[in-house]
Image (cartoon, rainbow, N blue to C red):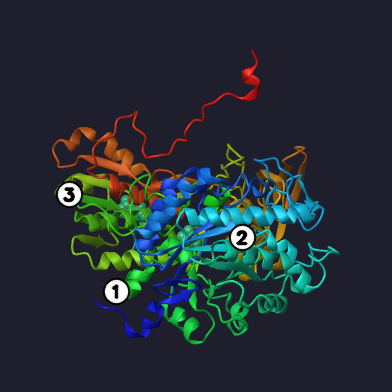
Amino acid sequence: MGRDPRFDILFDPVKIGPVTTKNRFYQVPHCNGMGYRDPTAHATMRSIKAEGGWGVVCTEQVEIHPTGDIAPFIELRNWSDEDVPALARIADAIHSRDALAGLQLAHNGMNAPNLYSREIPFGPADLPVFSIYNDPVQARAMDKTDIRNLRHWHRSAALRSKKAGYDLTYVYAGKLFGGAMFFLSRRYNQRTDEYGGSLENRCRLLKELIEDTKDAVGDTMAVACRISVDELLGEEGLHAAEAQDIIGHLAEIPDLWDLTLSSWDNDSQTSRFADEGYQEPFVTGIKKLTSKPVVGVGRFTSPDTMVRMVRQGILDLIGAARPSIADPFLPKKIEEGRTEDIRECIGCNICVSGDHTTTPIRCTQNPSMGEEWRRGWHPEYIRPKESDSKVLIVGAGPAGLEAAMMLGRRGYEVVLSEATRNLGGRLVGERALPGLSAWGRVVDYRVGQLQSMPNVQIYRESPLTSDDILAFGFEHVAIATGSRWRADGVGRRLLRPIPLTDQDVLTPDDLMAGHRPKKDPVVIIDDDHYYMGGVLAELLVREGRKVVLVTPTAEVSSWMEMTMEQHRVQARLLELDVEIVPHRLPVQATGDELTLACVYTGRTFTRPIGSLVLVTARLPEKNLAEELAARRAEWGDTALKSVTRIGDALAPGTIAAAVWSGRRYAEELDAPERSLDELPFLREVAGLHSGALPWQARS
Ligand code: ADP
Ligand code: SF4
């Protein structure tokens, strides 16, 4: 089936300076937690984006010099010629699939604490660095020599990008990552020389960097400028009108304008807090200021929205980071008229957590993300079946659905059996919680795919027992029976049950099943620290309940720093008048009194309580697997060869982890057995340097 002519405009070529992209699909720079440490894995990940039809595929921000080192985060480096082979590997991989390769040069200025290099950071002013961990590091105000040096390093890095084979490079002035943005900012730049004060002066460094880069490589490479169009800080920050003045001032100097909101948490908002295309009001009107092409993002997954962006003259190029992570083949699916096959991003920012934890990128929707090279997983293809075995999957949550879909693609005969009427497991309840409806795409995509697979049968309302399974005659059984929330308070910090007397206690499962606390105030004990505690508080308050959230940490949902949502959750709960009680753990609860202890001093406090909601930990539903294991002797009379727990039934975790576990099961079925000493994935080990150090030369 060919593409819908409505979408033809998305496949127009667009000229960007001296190069031309074959279509309007533009994978904007995005971090991936692999950077300089995992260059081949990185190259393979980018090549798959190119294979999936993106016209331009960019790297993440690439450090140009040790004075702009953002350790502990792992990005690419372009510090010297030694970095060129790794950079070239990525460019070559992108070119091999017929896309333009872009490299985002970045000197992070006052965002870089230089923890690795121990160089003194610099920027427009003598101020503490703007870094995620509030590092005790101050930047120094740059003098004219520093500015000259920075321009030299940027130019040298641009030349190395050219040597590495890139088609497009960047000057970065966005998100308070690109150092030039600190000069644009009235907050940071209070200089009195020609680099501060008037808008023209504050733009001077950015202008010089763009001109230097064009002068160095602009004959063959496009030079993009990535710039923030608003910091969402009102008049205090860089705001829309000011950003438009800046872009108007520099209008024709770069070959492309790449628009972002600042800082990153505003640019990459989650679906819980912002809809697809939420940047539209900030990017509308920019195209009138310049004749150069404009790219912007918006978690775009709908081709109709993309077409509208182009037709209404808002954007020339459809930028995407997360939609390209969730579905590297998004352009190809539109081109081939298979829009129903698009694996839409759910806006959960698990991908961002890879960068923040300095581990390879992962994605809830696309379990192959980050595993393309090291495990050989591809987002669209999987090797055909290697036997005529029949596979039973018990439980249709994220793990079971993914396993069934991928085994179905391999060509196995698969039966997916679900105890309840609904497919989706934990997501049946979770997608109905406030702000989480887009998470249902994990289920909808997989159920949609399964419906067209004649070799996969789905049985609903079919709770299975070990007797059933031993009677059926499947060779392989995956137990994807999920988990249940604990009702005793045991969790991360509390390792013994909370003594409870005459207490109305509910778990998240109870609330999702429709049960409600008997009495206010409802006290939620959150020892889970991800979304569930905060979301349930929101649910109950919106139903008119009085809610108190108790946590041993300083902040609610503290792990959500990793998804850049923590501050939004905290603000929302405060706005909803949820009483937040930090640094406390429960000691005991009776019908109307709760005793809490301070996590620092151990001092105890009592407070009135109506009902208790425990969000602490989950237990795997493993009875079925254990029963089958206990009946091992009976397998001989049947075809059964393996019983494997997957997803939450193995160990409760994120939805991303459950999907990944389902994929792993499908990948490893019938694979040659690995020896215990064989690593489960490939890795790249750093080459060792040789040569004497000066102090070793002493006789
Ligand atoms: P995961 O996140 O690992 O996919 P979920 O908890 O989301 O796990 O889903 C588990 C699913 O398994 C639920 O839909 C549940 O109804 C189903 N299930 C649990 N036990 C059985 C069983 N014995 N037979 C069939 N389905 C089951
Ligand atoms: Fe989208 Fe979540 Fe995947 Fe990130 S992890 S690309 S937000 S689905």
- Number of residues whose C-alpha sits closer than 10 Å to that of mark 3, classed few (under 14), some (14–19) or many (20 or more): few
Q: Nearer the viewer, mark 2 or mark 3?
A: 2
Query: Left of 481 or right of it: where is 204?
Result: right
Residue density around tag 1, few if under 14, some if 14–19, many if 20 or more, within 10 Å: few
Q: Which of disc 2 and disc 1 is earlier in sequence?
A: 1
Quarter of the picture holding the N terminus: bottom left
Residue beneath disc 1: 336
- Of residues 699 and 338, the one nearer the viewer is 699
> Quarter for ligand 1?
bottom left
Question: Image check: 418 left or right of 545?
Answer: left
Q: Can you give x and y, in whole percent of width and height, for residue 186 in the image?
A: 79, 67
Q: Mark 1–mark 2 contact, CB under 8 Å? A: no
Mark 1 C-beta closer than 8 Å to ligand 2: no
**Residue of label 3:** 472
Q: Residue furthest bottom?
A: 312
**Residue 109 picture quarter:** bottom right
Q: Secondary structure at mark 1?
A: loop
At label 3, which amino acid type do we have? Phe
Eyeballing the image, is 355 above or below 116?
A: below
Under circle 3, the secondary element is helix
Which residue is at a point 39% across and 79% down the rendered structure image?
12
Viewer-nearest of labels 3 and 1?
Answer: 1
Q: What whole-number distance in Å separates the C-alpha atoms at marks 2 and 3?
A: 46 Å
Look at the numbered disc 2 and give the secondary structure of its residue.
Answer: loop
The amino acid on which the numbered mark 2 sits, given as a three-letter code, is Glu
> Which mark is on residue 565?
2
